[in-house]
Amino acid sequence: MVRKQISLVAIILILSTAFAYAAPGDWVFDNWSEDGLSMTTMFDTGMHQETITRTLQPINSHINFIQFRQSLVNAPETAVIAYETGLSAGDAASGLSLWSSSIYTDFEDDKTGSKYDGDGVSVSVGMDKAFMDGMFVSGLSLAYDDSETSSAFNNGGTDTDSFTISPYLSYMLNNTYGLDFSFGWGQGDTDMHRDDLLGVKTSGSQDSDHSFYSVGISGNHWLQNISLGWRLGYYYSKTNYDSYTETDTDGLTTNIDDSSNKIGQIAASVQAGYYLKTWMPYVKVTYENETTRSPSSAADDDGFVWELGANLFGSGPFSGGASISTKSGRGSYESISAIARLSYAF
């Protein structure tokens, strides 16, 4: 058994390294020119991180819940009884599970000379299959993301739509510790506009493709009805933005070259919850640090995410959860997010 666990960890690490080099493109928000400067030099990479967060967070939340259920074997008797008469009754039939998640983010940056604000909405649906009595789970997620920004310094704004497909895996080393791995590919389209001081409007549209992978190890421990969890993870994302042509109201056109960006981040989180049979409120704090960020940014490359939420356990195959989170320590950049999810086990 130990040999199998070591082999699986080795496979995950090899796949992670390979994907880092093979993933197409680089990650960038846009290449919207202003007086010869790319908008990448004006906008913070916090916007890029919010987009990848809205794609990854629903997957990681779902995997976290899957692994939490397995840890209930170590929980006090009251929690185990609630589990066995609740969600697991739906799990026992086929091991199939359907889930959906919605997340909303409001963000802004008050940096002098390039202030902007915006919001984003992401909707994800997924399906997975459990094997080995729930110790191994493989699944697939589809996500649609829509984000809009406005910038007063140039009377501009953007509207970005993207789609992402993401396979994911969860493997429990035992009923306490687990591994997770996800990766994805997608495409997007950004419409942008701005006005100059003379009132001339300029607009353009830019296509993109993106890819990412995420790997993590986590644990969940019990102290009576108190659940203590942690996770150490890493994600890496690349996006290519195609060249495009912007046109102003005077009919003048400007060709903008293709561009690229990438983000790599290590994140360590701790979580504490109190199990109440049908639901579990929890608090969670995550420390984030960007090991890779290109182009570089003047913003801080590390910070904290503070989260307050609850997991809900219904009587039968339904379960769900909701949380709200906010970021701090990112200099002039700040954001707040709300997420809700629902799952059904066959």
Image: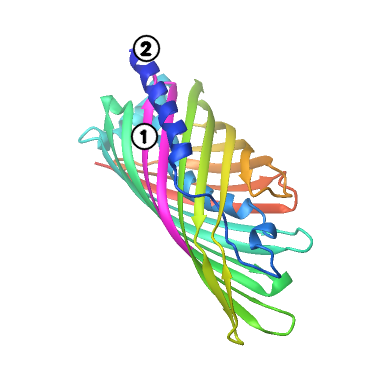
182 within the magenta span: yes
Q: Secondary structure at mark 2?
A: helix
**Most frequent secondary structure within the magenta stretch:** strand
Number of residue marks: 2
Q: Is residue 279 left or right of residue 268?
A: left
* Residue 256 drawn above or below residue 260: below
**223 or 28: nearer the eye?**
28
Residue at position x 60%, y 55% in the image: 47
Quadrant position of residue 312: top left
Question: In what quadrant of the picture does the N terminus appear?
Answer: top left
Task: Name the residue located 32 percent from the left edge and 33 percent from the top edge.
Answer: 137
Q: Is residue 213 left or right of residue 42?
A: left
Image location of residue 338, percent across then percent down: 54, 52
Magenta extent: 161-189
Residue 2 badge: 2
- Three-letter amino acid code at disc 2? Val
Q: Is residue 312 visible?
A: no
Q: Nearer the viewer, residue 75 or 305?
A: 305
Q: Give the image location of residue 221, x and y in percent.
A: 50, 22
Q: What whole-number distance in Å separates the C-alpha atoms at marks 1 and 2?
A: 19 Å
What is the basis of the colouring in this image?
rainbow
Residue that sits furthest to the left in the current view: 93
Q: Residues within 10 Å of mark 1 (few under 14, many from 20)?
A: many
- Which image quarter: residue 344? top left
Q: Say what amino acid the circle numbered 1 marks.
A: Leu
302 drawn magenta: no
Residue in the foreground of this view, choosing between 53 and 239: 239
Q: Classify 203 as above or below 103.
A: below
* Residue under label 1: 169
Classed neighbour count for the residue bearing mark 2: other residues with Cα under 10 Å, few (<14), some (14–19), many (≥20): few
Indicate the secondary structure of the residue bearing disc 1: strand
Q: Can the viewer see residue 307?
A: yes
